[in-house]
Amino acid sequence: MNADGVRRRDLLAYGALGLPLAFAALPLYVHVPRLYAELGLPLATVGAVLLAARIVDALTDPLIGWALDRRPGRRAWVAAALPLLGFGMIGLLAPPDGAGALWLFVLLVLVSLGYSVASIAHNAWGAEVAPTSALRTRFVASREGFALAGVMLAAALPAVLAAEGGEAAGLARLAQVFLPLLLVFGLWTLCACAAARNGGAGPASGARRAGIGLARARLRPAAGGVRGQWHCRGHSLGDGAVLRRRRARRHHLRRRLPGAVFRCGGSQPATVGPRLAADRQAARVARRHGAGGGGVRLGGDDRAG
């Protein structure tokens, strides 16, 4: 355990999954287009298929994030996504004879789906596994270090594996290397990494609950039994739908102003004098509370003017 109170094995276990995820990303953008072009697909068709797959990916990623926020358990999401990613990569990098645009599109969508679920859940896991920003930075640094190693392996291995048999054979062997890498490093993360401290419910859920609790604490009934008035940060609020109107219902006030008592914005009650002065006071109150909160208390009834 280091000075920050984090075990090194937790740091390494969390970052380990970054290696196969980065390893899988590079062939998708560098080697797959050239491979399928050599198999006989026109470059325009390959480009159109890649664009269509990216559009599907752009639509599914927000849905994946939405589902992850509402279904806790980052470990379970990663475990469900890794088989899809592993077997999809094998089918994509070692296609059968006669594989065409449909095969490329379906495999790209499956691999992108598995990669997106695993990477989004893995990134969220790192944000939740440590209580402070300094500790979260250490977990992210571990993940990025493994990712750098994965990119270097994915860049170097195809040329080494293609020494005999050409580029297509080298990519097929690359898929065979990827599967054990994914199995070893994926199991390392799934079995040895610490669980999320909030149960994997997501930081947004905790912030939402804290905000609701704070709002409930600040909104409390006004003291003295005044009905219909609530206090928020020291300012009294009446019926907002009425108080925000710029014109008071003067015909209603004229019948009730003699001897009435106004209580506006938490000020002390003040007796209203003659009808004319009260009418002018009512107009000023209406203008003032047309732009903001406040309450009007008439006689013994607590009603908004």
Image: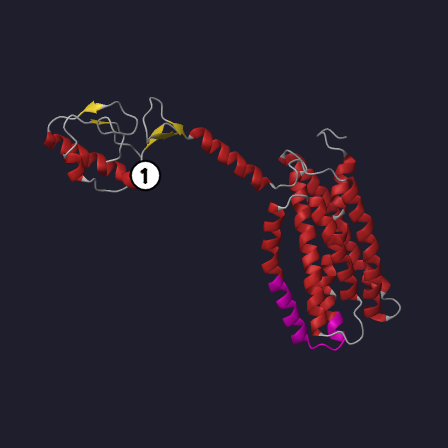
Horizontal side of residue 58 vs 156, given as left or right: left
Residue at the (75%, 48%) spot, across then down: 17
Answer yes or no: is residue 147 visible: no
Where on the picture, by quarter, is residue 73?
Answer: top right
Q: Residues within 10 Å of mark 1 (few under 14, many from 20)?
A: some
- Which quadrant holds the C terminus? top left
Q: Position of residue 282 (x, y in %)?
A: 18, 34
Q: What residue range appears in magenta?
A: 35-56
**Helix, strand or loop for the magenta stretch, by majority:** helix
In the rendered image, which quarter contains the N terminus? top right
Residue 235 sits inside the magenta stretch:
no
Q: Quadrant of residue 6?
A: top right
Q: Does residue 52 show up magenta in the picture?
A: yes
Picture coordinates of residue 44, whole percent (x, y): 65, 75
At x 75%, y 40%, the residue is 193
Residue closer to the observer: 70 or 211? 70
Instruction: Determine whether 217 is above or below 165 in the image.
Output: above
Q: Is residue 266 left or right of residue 124?
A: left
Report helix, strand or loop for mark 1. Answer: helix
Kindly tell me whether residue 88 is visible in this rendering.
yes
Observer-nearest of 224 and 165: 224
Q: From the viewer's perspective, is residue 163 above or below residue 16?
A: below
Name the kind of residue labelled 1 in the image. Answer: Gly
Structure colour scheme: secondary structure
The image shows residue 15 at horizontal and vertical percentages of 74, 44
Depicted 105 relative to depicted 212: above or below: below
How far across and how far down the image is residue 302, in percent?
A: 27, 30
Who's the residue at 82% across and 63% down the image? 159
Residue, disc 1: 240
